[in-house]
Every structure is written in C-alpha cells, then in structure tokens.
Image (cartoon, rainbow, N blue to C red):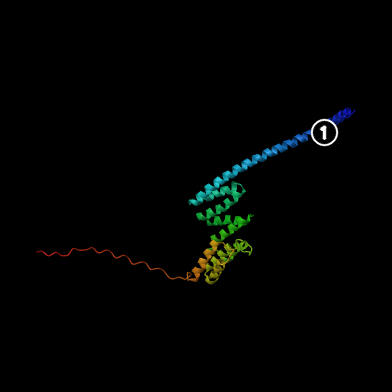
Amino acid sequence: MSDIFQEVEEDVRRERLEKLWKEYGDYVIAAASILIIGAAGYQLWRYHDAQARAKASNDYMAAQQLLDSGQSHAAAEAFARLSQDAPSGYAKISELQQADALLASGDRPHALMVYKRIADGGDEMLSAIARIRIGWATAETASKTELQADLAPLTAANSPWRPMAREILAYADYRAGAMSQSQSEFEALANDSNAPASLRGRVRAMATFIKTGGDKDFGTVPKPPPPVPAQTATPKDQTTP
C-alpha cells in the first residue's frame, strides 16, 4: 500500500511542477538569461575600462614628457584632450596639468581661468592645489585683498593648507613694502610645527633676508674700469760702431 501512495504523491508533485513550469518557465529562462548577460557585460566593461586606463596612462606620460622638455604649448593641448576623454581620475589631474602647461607657455589668463574652474569644482584636494597655484601666479600683480579672497578656504585654523596660504600672504606684504609685518609673518611660519620642513626653511631664509637689510637698496655696483691696452715694446736704439 505504501508504494501506491508514494507513486500517487510523485505523480501529483510532477503535475504541479509541470503546471508551474508552463506558467512561469519563461520568466525563469528570462531571469537566467539576464544574469548571464549581466555577468558577461560586467566582464566586458572591466576589460574596456582597463584598456581605457592603460591608454590614458600612456597618453598622460607622453604629455608630461612634452612639458618636461619645454614643449608647453603641445603639452597643454595634450592635457586638454585627456581632461575631456580620459577616465575620471586621469581627466581631473590632466586638467590641473593643462593649467600648469598654459602658465609655463606664457598664457597666464587662460591658465588662471582653468585653475579657477578647478578651484570651484567638487574635488577638495585639487581645489586646494589650484588655489595655491592661483596665489603664486598672481602674487606679483594682485592686491593682498584679492589674494585673501582666493585663499580664504585654505586659511582656516584646521586647514592642512594654511601654512602654504600664509606664505603667499606674507610674500604679498613683502612685495607691498610692509617689511616689519612680512618679517613677523615669515618668522611665525618658520616656528610653526605644522608647516612642512621645506616651507619652514624657505620662510626662515626670507625672515633672515629682511632682518639683515635685504630689503634696502644699496645702489648699483659700478662697472669695472676698461682694461688697459697692452703697450708694444720698442727695441732699444743701437749704437753704430
């Protein structure tokens, strides 16, 4: 009897499975297909992403070599292309390098425009770097008020960029002739343990330069006298015997 009940139970189970398959089999096949296609698509995307990053790396190195060799115009054009076409990370750093190349080529207005676009962007680190470079690019021409406005986000007490921003502002005072104030700012920076060692060395040298009278005009060094022309030796008169 148990065998009969088992056979009946198996037939009922089979009929239920067949009914379920007829109703939902297409959905099962579709779901499996989507999973397979999705996995294949992901692998294909990874392959193309790796290829794009490898190409961007090679193009970036080629552009950097142009800049290092003094071909700043060509480098600026190469970095501009990368900033438009390369994957996100390479695109962002290439835009910053484009501005550097433009500045090196003498196209200061265009370089400042690119720096300011980066400074107003969403990348906190690149924005800070761009602001520091704007500061040094305009330190000789901009007023201290203008520099303070450009550097304002970096001068907060908890900003890691604060020492670099303060160095630019101290230089602005030096350039404006406020020597005492500039010297004090440079000395304070030289004693700031949060400042990088290389920066402390620079500002200490500037403070010493101002303190020892380096800001004073001592006149010009006179030109050396012209060389005395060599005299031609004449033979002594000989006496005729």
Q: Is residue 138 visible?
A: no
Q: Report the quarter where the C terminus lies.
A: bottom left
Residue at 64% x, 42% y is 46
Residue 112 rendering spot, x and y as whole percentages: 56, 57
Percent x, y of residue 23: 81, 33
Q: Crowding near pointer 1: few (<14 within 10 Å), some, many (20+)?
A: few
Helix, strand or loop under label 1:
helix
Direction from residue 23 to residue 114 in the image, left or right: left
Residue 50 x, y percent position in the rendering:
61, 43
- Residue at position x 72%, y 38% from top? 35
Q: Which residue is mark 1?
A: 20
Q: Is residue 60 above or below residue 160?
A: above
Instruction: Give the position of the N terminus as an image quadrant.
Output: top right
Q: Residue furthest right?
A: 1
Where is 44 relative to 164, above or below?
above
The disc labelled 1 sits on which kind of residue? Leu
Total marks placed: 1
- Image quarter of residue 190: bottom right
* Left or right placement of residue 36 versus residue 7 in this view: left
- Answer whether residue 31 is visible to the viewer in this image: yes
- Horizontal side of 207 relative to 160 (left or right) equals left
Residue 127 falls in image quadrant? bottom right
Residue 182 image point, x, y percent: 54, 69
Q: Residue lying furthest front in this view?
A: 2
